[in-house]
Amino acid sequence: MPGSPPTPDPSRAAERAAVEREVSRRIAPDAGLLGRLADVRERLVRRASTEANHRAIPLRRALVAGSAARGTFLHERFDIDLFLLFPPDLSRERLESDGLRLAEAILEAPEKHYAEHPYLRGRFEGFTVEAVPGYAVEDPSRPQTAVDRTPFHQEYLSAHLAPGQVEEVRLAKQFLRALGVYGSEAKTAGFSGYLVELLIVRFGGLDAWLTAAQNWRIPVHLASPGSRPAVPDDVALIFDDPVDPHRNVATALSAESLGRFILAAREYLRKPTLAAFFPEPIPPLSLSAAKERVRARGTHVAVARLARPALVDDILYPQLRKAERSLGAEAERLGFEVLGTSSAAGTSDLWIAIETGAAELPRVRVQPGPPPGLTHSDAFLEKWSAPSVGVLQGPYLRPDGKLAVDVVREETRLEPLLLAAAPHLAIGRDLRETSKSGVSVRPLETVEESPEIAGLLDRLLNKRLPWSQA
């Protein structure tokens, strides 16, 4: 990939080196674990081939890929990813049924999970294994499932990730994990493991990557010349997949997550500490502390609750965030000053919190009208001059020359207004279905304590950069 790696600031190099040696000591798997894992990988692939032949399952190839294959995992923080690759002309129905049947023959205590399609998670010789079916495609730019590029990723990184960079990848993953931005799943919207490894290849090591990142401006363009990754308008980082130049590896990364990383890079280079990799856990706000904080701020918090549909997280969280944005936008459209929103998912419920400058709107509402001289100005005057429409003042002319009238607002409280608007808002197809069974919107004062509520309120009322926490 183009571009020469920037040189890290030497003034803090010795401090960073000492910190990173200690971090590596804590997170690196020992030689015994790496040796056992290498043996298990080989036996796992052989077992998959044997079981496929025994059951006449048309397996094209079995492959262990990901961090367990490259040794870039953190100590005791990894699963073995086994990919069961089938002929590209096999139907999707057969892919799923044969893939699950084969995985069940390999794994102990298998459990079914869902992503783009079902896969199994179980045990093999003491290790946790995720067995995922896919297609053995020949062109990584034309995948049939989300995992079909995996063999090409494995081949690329095996060729380009130097042995000395494995430790750098682990350091980077721990740094991102400490920030809460490691993981490309929708719940986290952070850096995928594959993206981390590509960035280490690109910059050579963590320090050089951080040195470059401290001056990034979002959106960040790291695409190779000639590549044309398809990106949405709100993309935070553009980094083309080396095995498919039309794909942006960083699509899942949010601007908030990338912004946190940029600031953390600057902070760590300025002041290297172990806390950058192992921060002290900070308990979330209790419900009583949150209520006291709202009183001190002189604001109001409404909490919406709806049933959680049976969806995997990667489908659920985009819809939950869409519902959060829609409720916040509706509160603004109604006339409330929205100071912040947050959302959380529990096992059976979804929660959205909205902080506004006040609990109620004024009783008076200005109803704007057309300028004089237009045909429908007569209709406006006729409608709002009637004695039964609750006019408090007007009709009158505003300084801009348009008609207006002050009328009585029938409902002024935030909660009833949001509840009435909820059925008509864009909250995601699946959430709309579950909302038909009931949505509640209540003031914070009436909400009961729960872990989900604690996290919800912490994200709403305790927003600080991690290293600035007291």
Image (cartoon, grey):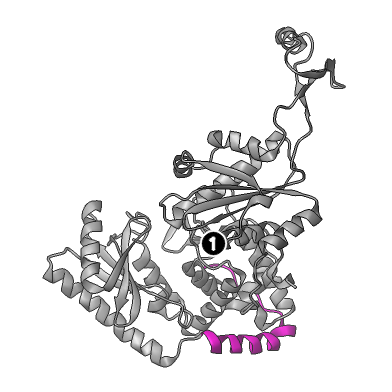
Indicate yes or no whether the magenta region holds residue 180: no
Quarter of the image with the C terminus in it? bottom right
Point 65% across, 43% down: residue: 328
Position in image of residue 166 (x %, y %): 49, 81
Position in image of residue 443 (x %, y %): 67, 47
In the drawing, does residue 116 fall left or right of residue 381? Answer: left
Query: Callout 1: 10 Å neighbours few (<14), some, many (20+)?
Result: some
Residue type at the position of mark 1: Thr
Find the residue positioned furthest to the right. Answer: 399
Q: Quadrant of residue 15?
A: bottom right
In this picture, is 314 found above or below 73?
A: above
Find the magenta span and give its range: 1-27
Observer able to see residue 462: no
Q: Quadrant of residue 336?
A: top right
Q: Nearer the viewer, residue 62 or 222?
A: 62
Indicate yes or no whether the magenta region holds residue 24: yes
In the drawing, does residue 467 fall left or right of residue 231? Answer: right
In the drawing, does residue 323 fall left or right of residue 270? Answer: left
Magenta: main secondary structure equals helix
* Number of dots carrying numbers: 1
Q: Quadrant of residue 372?
A: top right
Q: Nearer the viewer, residue 447 or 27?
A: 447
Secondary structure, mark 1, is loop
Q: Nearer the viewer, residue 194 or 238?
A: 194
In this picture, is 38 found above or below 319?
A: below
In this picture, is 284 found above or below 375?
A: below
Point 59% across, 34% down: residue: 420
Position in image of residue 402 (x %, y %): 80, 18
Position in image of residue 362 (x %, y %): 79, 33
- Determine which residue is flagged by label 1: 188
Observer able to see residue 235: yes
Point 51% across, 81% down: residue: 165
